[in-house]
Image: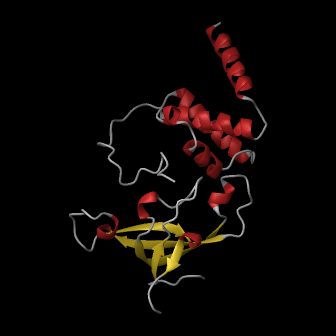
Amino acid sequence: MMFSVGDRVRIKDSHPPGHRRTPYYVRGKTGVVERYCGDFKNPEELAYGFDGTPKRELYRVRITQTELWPDYEGSDSDTLDLEIYDHWLEKIGGQ
Amino acid sequence: MSQRQHDMGGMEAGPVESDEHATEPWAKMITSLAAALRDHDIMRIDELRRALEDLPEDIYKQEYFERWSEAMINLLEEKGLLSRGEVMGKMDALKAQLEG
């Protein structure tokens, strides 16, 4: 697997055209891998008639609400979990 | 590349309407057609999503199942299976039949 639970990751701040499975508002944000969800055919390729291979690893990433929304008024410990494919993630931090 | 029309997270969108409303028969029919197209490997759910996102803004603003029917027609045309004219022709024939 490309990432482990607890890894700090950045969601790529990338804006390719077409059908993309990473919401705009999380691009460029950082979070922590909460779990590995399995590997799946790539829906961004399936959407255009390709066979979706190679399969992509899907990770549940936990992001704090204050990271997502600069004007968030709730608790610093509030989080959002969302599932992101490996090709949208990059590891950050030393180890 | 700017934010696509379906990708609304964080946008101002107003309150969510929570009123119950009956599903019209034609909307159920569209759901069944989508399931049939998937069962016969004619359309994938990811293709439907892509076709929905690609709709022109004025059509995207229409009701949920209006969008689905427009997106499905576009996919059938893209795949060379049916033209929009053929679908609309059949709709007109059915309408005439129903109205007797």
Measuring 79% from the left and 37% from the top, which residue is drawn there? B80
Q: Quadrant of residue B35?
A: top right
Give above or below for B82 relative to A33.
above
Residue B53 drawn at (x, y percent): 55, 45
Quadrant showing the C terminus of chain B: top right
Measuring 52% from the left and 68% from the top, which residue is drawn there? A84
What is the residue that sits farthest to the right in this orientation? Answer: B80
Q: Out of B57 and A1, give the one closest to the viewer.
A: B57
Check the image and tell me how it is coloured: secondary structure
Is A39 situated left or right of A25 in this image?
A: right
Give above or below for B75 relative to B93.
below
Is B29 situated left or right of A77 in this image?
A: right
Measuring 76% from the left and 41% from the top, which residue is drawn there? B79
Residue B97 drawn at (x, y percent): 68, 12
Is B73 situated left or right of B1 in this image?
A: right
What is the residue that sits farthest to the front in this orientation? Answer: B1
Residue A48 drawn at (x, y percent): 69, 52
